[in-house]
Amino acid sequence: MTLPMIHRVVTGHDAQGNAVVASDGAPELHARSADALREGFSEIGDAGASTGGGGAPHPLMHRTESVDYSVVIEGEITLVLDKTEVPLKTGSVVIQRGTNHAWANRSGRPCRMLFLLVDGAFDPQIAQAISARGRGSDITLHGRLTQL
């Protein structure tokens, strides 16, 4: 399966405050190693978001204080959680509520997804439990996000 290129339009403002097109065309695609992705968490200000240390079920495990809406547009992918995995296919939607997770494409074919992230904050009890368990632990937490 070959996926068609994405046509991306990015808007912005000129010096006078008028709405303008900042870029129009295909985005650059960058393949990255697990180490480079973990370093990327540091670059965006939260090295602790990467939880893929020793004992983690996937090297790219991570957690953010957000509600993430993930839609499989084309292809197949596996959602990896602390103690389970969920195979997803075209049309699947995941509502990720701040849990530790990773994505694994084991299909041998491309997968295209859409992500929408909404900032949030952990419920204080959940934040305390996450902090207490440390990185790479295998305890699954269930709870809610607040302050959205």
Image (cartoon, helix red, strand yellow):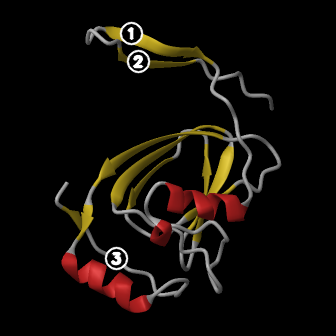
Residue at 37 percent across and 82 percent down: it is 130
Label 3 element class: loop
Report the Cα–Cα distance between label 3 and label 2.
38 Å
- The disc, 2 or 1, on the residue closer to the chain's N-terminal end is 2
Q: In this view, does 8 lie above or below 99?
A: above
Residue at 62 percent across and 80 percent down: it is 53
Label 1 element class: strand
Quadrant (top left/top right/bottom left/bottom right) for the C terminus: bottom left
As drawn, the residue found furthest toward the bottom would be 132
- The disc, 3 or 2, on the residue closer to the chain's N-terminal end is 2
Residue 79 can be seen in this image: no
- The disc, 3 or 1, on the residue closer to the chain's N-terminal end is 1
**Callout 1 environment at 10 Å: few (<14), some (14 to 19), or many (20+)?**
few
Report the Cα–Cα distance between label 3 and label 1.
44 Å
| 17 left or right of 142 in image | left
Residue at 28 percent across and 74 percent down: it is 143
Residue 111 can be seen in this image: yes
Residue tagged 3:
142
Residue tagged 1:
20
Report the Cα–Cα distance between label 2 and label 1.
6 Å
For the residue marked with disc 3, what is the amino acid? His
For the residue marked with disc 1, what is the amino acid? Val
Residue at 45 percent across and 87 percent down: it is 134
Label 2 element class: strand
Residue tagged 2:
11
